[in-house]
Amino acid sequence: MQAEVIACHETSKQAFWLRNLVTVMKIVDSIQKPLKIYCDNKATVRTIRKPQLQG
């Protein structure tokens, strides 16, 4: 499961980077919608949604 959590984390970092790139390059004004990252591993999803991990 740890590998899946790391994969989701890396995916989210890349998605935020791309969002910022698109905004900085003024391809669009800004992106207001939240990013959706799909994961089919139920244990990983439960781990990520734990309140202790929300900061």
Image (cartoon, grey):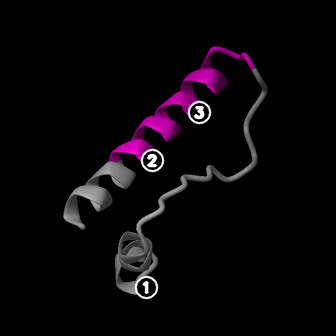
Q: Which residue is mark 1?
A: 51
Q: Amino acid at mark 1?
A: Pro
**Upstream in sequence: badge 1 or badge 2:** 2
Q: Nearer the viewer, mark 2 or mark 3?
A: 2
Quick one: 7 or 50, which is closer to the camera?
7
Instruction: Check residue 16 for magenta coloring.
Output: yes
**Upstream in sequence: badge 3 or badge 1:** 3
Q: Which residue is mark 3?
A: 19
Q: Is residue 8 left or right of residue 26?
A: left
Q: Position of residue 29 (x, y in %)?
A: 78, 27
Task: Using the image, determine if residue 10 lies above or below residue 30.
Answer: below
Residue 21 placement: quadrant: top right
Q: Label 2: few (<14), some or many (≥20) within 10 Å?
A: some
Q: Position of residue 36 (x, y in %)?
A: 61, 53
Helix, strand or loop at label 2? It is: helix
Q: Which residue is mark 2?
A: 12
